[in-house]
Image: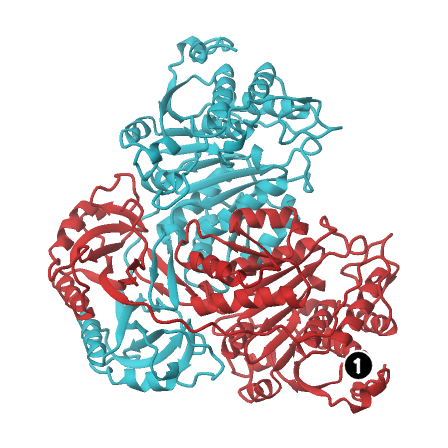
Chain colours: A red, B cyan
Amino acid sequence: MNDLSTLVSPPDEGAAAAITPVPITVAYGDGIGPEIMTASLRVLIAAGAAIAPEVIDIGERVYLSGNSAGIAPESWDSLRRTKVFYKAPITTPQGGGFKSLNVTVRKSLGLFANIRPCASYAPFVQTKHPRMDLVIVRENEEDLYAGIEHRHTDDVYQCLKLISRPGCEKINRYAFEYARAYGRNKVTCFTKDNIMKLTDGLFHKVYDEVGAGYPDIEKEHWIIDIGAAKLADTPEIFDVLVMPNLYGDILSDVAAQIAGSVGLAPSANIGEHCAMFEAIHGSAPRRAGQNLANPSGLLMGGVLMLIHLGKREVAERVHNAWLRTIEDGVHTYDIFREGVSRQKVGTREFGEAVVARLGERPRQLAAVSYPPGPAVPTLGARPRPPAKRELRGVDVFLHWTASNRDPNVLGPAVQAAQGDGLRLAMVSNRGQKVWPQGAAETFCTDHWRCRFQVDDGKPAIAQTQVFELLRRIDALGLSVIKTEHLYTFDGERGYTLGQGQ
Amino acid sequence: MNDLSTLVSPPDEGAAAAITPVPITVAYGDGIGPEIMTASLRVLIAAGAAIAPEVIDIGERVYLSGNSAGIAPESWDSLRRTKVFYKAPITTPQGGGFKSLNVTVRKSLGLFANIRPCASYAPFVQTKHPRMDLVIVRENEEDLYAGIEHRHTDDVYQCLKLISRPGCEKINRYAFEYARAYGRNKVTCFTKDNIMKLTDGLFHKVYDEVGAGYPDIEKEHWIIDIGAAKLADTPEIFDVLVMPNLYGDILSDVAAQIAGSVGLAPSANIGEHCAMFEAIHGSAPRRAGQNLANPSGLLMGGVLMLIHLGKREVAERVHNAWLRTIEDGVHTYDIFREGVSRQKVGTREFGEAVVARLGERPRQLAAVSYPPGPAVPTLGARPRPPAKRELRGVDVFLHWTASNRDPNVLGPAVQAAQGDGLRLAMVSNRGQKVWPQGAAETFCTDHWRCRFQVDDGKPAIAQTQVFELLRRIDALGLSVIKTEHLYTFDGERGYTLGQGQ
């Protein structure tokens, strides 16, 4: 095996010696990480990638040295300088206090898009879905992953799902730009906007708005439950999919698994300033150090990185050589099957097999083609004029367990806090209206929402009127756990009605 | 075809004439609903179900007559009297203002458990998963389906995910009781508690607590993304699954679809007082009135209803006759396949084919067995002593767009509101800490969270101190959009740290 350093200027490209290597930040990670990173870099550089790796240390050792984020402060300098992070899997130590490195990197660097291509390679890799070739574009920064959770009462815990218009704009524009740059024909959107009319409704609406600017690309929207069922059953009908964070998290794992192997799938995390490329699988500590692991996921992550760096020709060369290797039955243990595979190889040998096929193309599987073109642009959100916002009331949440939790006791009691134009419109429990005129069967927790509103036609209130209301509620001896102000935006209601309201 | 009324006292059961028919509430619904309900009732009654249907009107006509919930107020009387609702699919009219009837019924009657058995019937019904036989027990009342959404700013929309301890207890106890009653061996739990440590963490914790009381039943927990991937790829490894509402919504549709047909799958909605049984598919208006639709889903819903009513012997007779019908290749258009099916039949004829096979059992498919036993009990949550709750601070959320949204301007400005023991600990944007010491790359919306806390070791504060803080923030000219109080419970933190805090 050659010394990697001699390969930075690739010998097999005519003008290669003149190419200035592009600095990238590389982390070898934990477990099988070092082996698969070594094999992957070997292939990329042999193919003429002209990259100059700067190595940083992340993962288990950094965590255990007392850094709760798993990355040393000085490593950020390299990431900010190179703006490209090629990352092997890491091990997060068991036990409390250790934070997800991936979440930290994504959020700190604003990597708003997670790109997950999933293809099947039948008959060479076993799958029930031989014609699958899709890409999931997952929003990566918001939704329930903002990590904002509160325990309010003995009974009730809450997590905030946040969806922003700029977040929706950026991810939907990226999905359509991605489809165009990769010559894909359709972008499908999945949401649950029949239930979450404001948050998922916004995602769907922005998808429609953005999609209108791409008349060449087919568009369709599915409710997530039915869409997920279709994806799991007939993935071949999908092309590019765009969705909020949680749905994308679940369905990108579903897609990779049913394609035949999570060991082959890469992931790109794209931001306006930086990008990160990796395999989707973990560090598999039990396989470490045995030259067993399949480097394909990380190598394919490298292909995505090359495309991002504008090195589309090199990316095509690596990808096609890899397809040929798979097709030739040169397989690591994880995808090896008697009768289909021809040669069981280790991590290193697999990498060498790909290197040996550089310049070749698959014969049975479809070859990929990455004609010259720019990287997928990361378009920011378009500026919009602010809406006219009016405060129309407040939802005050109470912890209350008296009187056998009878809403017909609580309602009139809270009414005593009315005044200054604010009227108690309803009390709900877990979203279900229980006063006035609730149903006796509704189970009530100790967590109550009291909606105070000004009457229609009356002028908007000042926020101090809300604070005064809170004082009056306090004077009634009631315990406030949170508030949600009720606004209209350009006259449109910015809050949903209670179930039964 | 016989008149249904003559069949209420079934002629084929010796002592049947002496059985008092059990009143149930029946709705024929919209689209294909009347046809499949007629066929299903015909089979149930012919099998000796001894039920006395009370018919109520729900759905499209009720919606369009001006009832936004799709159910007339007087229909609730029947539901409360019979406590059992056998419901055909309905059509919700397009356009705004119509509320989901299912959500209304579930929430009003406290139907906390949604039960979705999904089995494959290979080779008679085409599927890629021939050995699948699982049951998803989905929490049905809380999670993001509380429907509490607020638009806070120009940029940001929010939905509350609420998870309660009694909600978790009830659904997990039901899942284990269900497994025991049906002779199933394993209950698997899916959550995303590596990200949502408080809410999904509670669900997982209660699953563990409850599961400890069922040493005879195997237990396992999967993170939802990997679990969903396994479910979509190898559903045969699962038995009973229990999960929060949203995951259950998505995965029960995935399971039904990959089993081979959503047309065969039933659903039970179980509460402490009432229960509802139905097919999982919709009203298919385009197939209506043509004697085409497959009544199997609703008929299997009827089997679940019979078991719920304690009529396990009749349920077994219907289920086995139905399996035999499927196995005999008597198929409606939706599952008809040349070479496998033998006879293409309509809705009525399918029902008659099942009736003709009452008393028979399948020969190739596994016959079901429902030995006498009680219905699955709906156990309430166990009472717990309240925790000692202390107020330690508040998250105040602001709408702010000044100074190019520079957190290093906002932080010091908000600090001016400190006092009375409350100190500004951090500012975050979509959960990511941006002050002090944020990253320049973090994209900032117009939605800011300012966390004020009392120092460790200092006594807890009164809620009036929070309200005073809000007044001081108002005096700084800042716009408050919501608050979340920060509590400890028995000294344990009831809130997550900000990413980077």
- Whether residue B379 sits left or right of residue A331 in the image: it is left
* Residue at x-position 45% and y-position 41%: B114
Residue closest to the eye, B164 or A111: A111
Tell me the quarter of the image containing the N terminus of chain A.
bottom right
Mark 1: secondary structure = loop
Image location (x, y in percent) of residue A479? 21, 62
Where is residue B254 drawn, in percent x and y? 57, 46
Above or below, comparing residue A108 to residue B463 in the picture? below
Q: Is residue B335 visible?
A: yes
Judged left or right of residue B5, residue A332 is right
Q: Position of residue A5 (x, y in %)?
A: 78, 88
A128, B206: nearer the viewer: A128
Residue B200 in percent (x, y) is at 45, 58
Q: Alpha-carbon neighbours of circle 1 within 10 Å: few (<14), some, or many (≥20)?
A: many
In this view, B294 is above or below A67: above
Image quadrant of residue A101?
A: bottom right
Q: Which residue is mark 1?
A: A48
Q: Quadrant of residue A345?
A: bottom right
